[in-house]
Image (cartoon, helix red, strand yellow):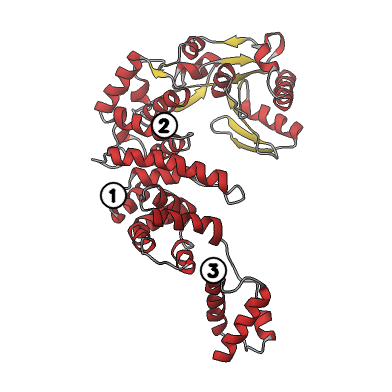
Amino acid sequence: MEKHLKGLAQEIQELINLAKDTAETLGFNAYLIGGFVRDLILGVKNLDLDIAIEGDGIKFSEAFAKKLNARLISHKRFGTATVTLKHHLKIDIATTRKEYYPEPGCLPVVNKGALKDDLYRRDFTINTLAISISGENFGKLIDPFNGRSDIEHKNVRILHNLSFIDDPTRILRAIRFEQRYNFKIEHHTLKCLKDSVGLKMLSIVQPQRLRDEMILILKEKRPSRQIRRMQELANLDFIKPGLKISETSLRLFDSIDSQICWFKSNFTLHRPLDGWLIYFMALIDSQSGQEAKDICQRFVLRKGEEKRILSYFGSRSVVVSKLSKAKVLPSTVFHILEPLSYEVILLIKAGCRNKKVIRRIEDFFHLYNGTNVSVSGHDLNGLGIEPGPHYQQIFSKLLNAKLNGKVKTKSEELEFARKLKNIR
């Protein structure tokens, strides 16, 4: 594996060597572990390092973060820590541990353990690989569960028969890894997964844990495949009993893929999209506004996320109706769309087949979004207009005039304001 390590970016190699030196100074064994090793073998870029420490992960992380002058967040109860560098490179550190599940679907009880214990508690064999970065074993691959073979044969395989019973969120994770890497869920694993779904194991998991797994799925690149596979294998009762995704909805996910690509390629300076939220709204698109609100509250979504979701359910038909009319002024397009988030607007666009609506939404993004007037209150005062509530009316009329092409420059805005003064 040394060859793989030497192929990493220089910065990552330096971090690994620093971790090696820190562990050796403290007398601990250190290992690269989990997803980082999996992606290293696959040749997939992954800049988030996972390091396991046989010893004291907290003590190691404190020494490591000090050497890097980096931000450290530690959880002493669990023996885990995260070191974050200034440019957001993240290193997760954990004391090797073993765990058991007192009841199906609940969080595990964790105790200190050896490296093999730590690998055995993981979800799939492809995530059980480790690379020693200690002493003379530096670069040695540790593979007690034949994870490398499963990577080479493109298999997602559980470690034991009760894996999906212990932690049913692994059902969603299996789908995510299968679709991300174009793997297949191995035959016995698939049987165990279907058995767990049949026992409705996802229904006993805390909604917040399901939410986090769902968001990870929806953050995957073009997650429409994951959504299709999720409906096929797990059904969607864990989101809402009886929830089904129609073929029309599945086509909507494909359209969302295209709309997100369109936005990212055309508007690089706009704020980043919460793409997962668009897919989530599409996932529950068949629900009423109240049902959508109930889902948001069950999954304990953030207030800003819930607000955007409910604004979609409250505005989708109205927006399409208003923008479908034969003649719509640019100022009207602006005032219809400006209060909505990018995510809501793009979902409306993805689900619409009306060319007028699509063109007006594109005009909004290209021409109107972010438009404001150049004239200030100080300028209005300079025209002899006394300050007061009417300023807002003047600014509103100025903005509409600018959007509709009646004024373009600041001098034209001032002249327009002067005429409004005389009208008053």
Proximity of marks 1 and 3: CB atoms separated by less than 8 Å: no
Residue beneath label 1, please?
287
Which mark is drawn over residue 219?
none
Where does label 3 land, which residue?
A: 403
Gap in angstroms between the C-alphas marked 1 and 2: 31 Å
Circle 3 crowding by C-alpha within 10 Å: few under 14, some 14–19, many from 20 = many
From the top left corner, tell me how far across and down residue 359 is, in percent: 45, 55
Question: Could you classify mark 1 by the number of other residues whose Cα lies within 10 Å: few (under 14), some (14-19), or many (20 or more)?
Answer: some
Badge 3 or badge 2: first in the primary sequence: 2
At 40% from the left edge and 38% from the top edge, which residue is drawn? Answer: 254
Q: Position of residue 277 (x, y in %)?
A: 44, 46
- Residue drawn at (51%, 9%), measured in percent from left and top? 144
For residue 271, above or below residue 101: below
In the picture of the structure, the residue carrying the numbered disc 2 is: 107
Residue 312, placed above or below residue 217? below
Amino acid type of the residue tagged 1 in the rendering: Gln
**Between marks 1 and 3, how big is the CA–CA gap?**
36 Å
The residue mark sitting in front, 1 or 2, is: 1
Q: Name the amino acid, label 2.
A: Leu
